[in-house]
Image (cartoon, rainbow, N blue to C red):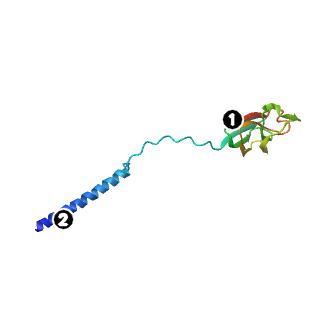
Amino acid sequence: MQSTRTRSVVVIAAAVLLAAVAIGLVSLAGSLGGSDKPSSPPKQAAAPAAAGPSLVNVQLSDFKIKPSEASIPAGKVTFVAKNTGDAEHEMVVVRTDKAAGSLAKGGGEASEAGSVGEIGEFKAGATERKAFNLKPGRYVLLCNVPGHYKAGMYTAFTVR
């Protein structure tokens, strides 16, 4: 009778030991990348994110304006203007259907009718930044420091 009881204890102990080993193996497989969860379908490429704010670097020299982009999406646009010239410059953003070179009002300056804002005059070697909310349309970026527009310091810019 004692041998039956001993055998029962040994069988129970073996079953508990096997269960512990099985649990350990399942845990180990999960940490190595295995999973007991049903497999999910492969992930599809995410849809492109909505266009965020645009950043346009603009180089102002004596006497040109050169944006890094000639056309950008509508919305929030941050212009980072760097004055690489020897004189002070500014950058005025004018919404207009007129050609960039046809805004002269006399005295070497341009009409600022349609202006949506500007980065005011700043020194040579300096960099200024300013954000604007731009609607689709045609724009002109220009420097309206006396004589600079007349010297050709303007460029066309499109917001789509």
User: Is 39 situated above or below 85?
Assistant: below
The N terminus - image quarter: bottom left
Pointer 1 local density, CA inside 10 Å: few below 14, some 14–19, many at least 20: some
User: Is 102 situated above or below 11?
Assistant: above
Occupied quadrant, residue 137: top right
- Decide which of tag 2 and tag 1 comes sooner along the chain: 2
Q: Residue at x 52, y 42 (%)?
A: 46
Q: Residue at x 68, y 43 (%)?
A: 75
Type of amino acid under label 2: Val
**Contact, mark 2 vs mark 1 (Cβ under 8 Å):** no
Q: Position of residue 87 (x, y in %)?
A: 80, 39
Please tell me whether mark 1 sits on a helix, a strand or a loop. strand
Q: Residue at x 67, y 42 (%)?
A: 55
| Residue named by callout 1 | 71
Residue 10 versus residue 97: which sits nearer the camera? 97
| Residue named by callout 2 | 9
Q: Residue furthest right?
A: 107
Pointer 2 local density, CA inside 10 Å: few below 14, some 14–19, many at least 20: few
Q: Position of residue 86 (x, y in %)?
A: 79, 38
Type of amino acid under label 1: Ser
Q: Position of residue 128 (x, y in %)?
A: 73, 45
Occupied quadrant, residue 41: top left
Q: Cα distance, mark 2 to mark 1?
A: 82 Å
Occupied quadrant, residue 126: top right
45 with respect to 95 (left or right): left
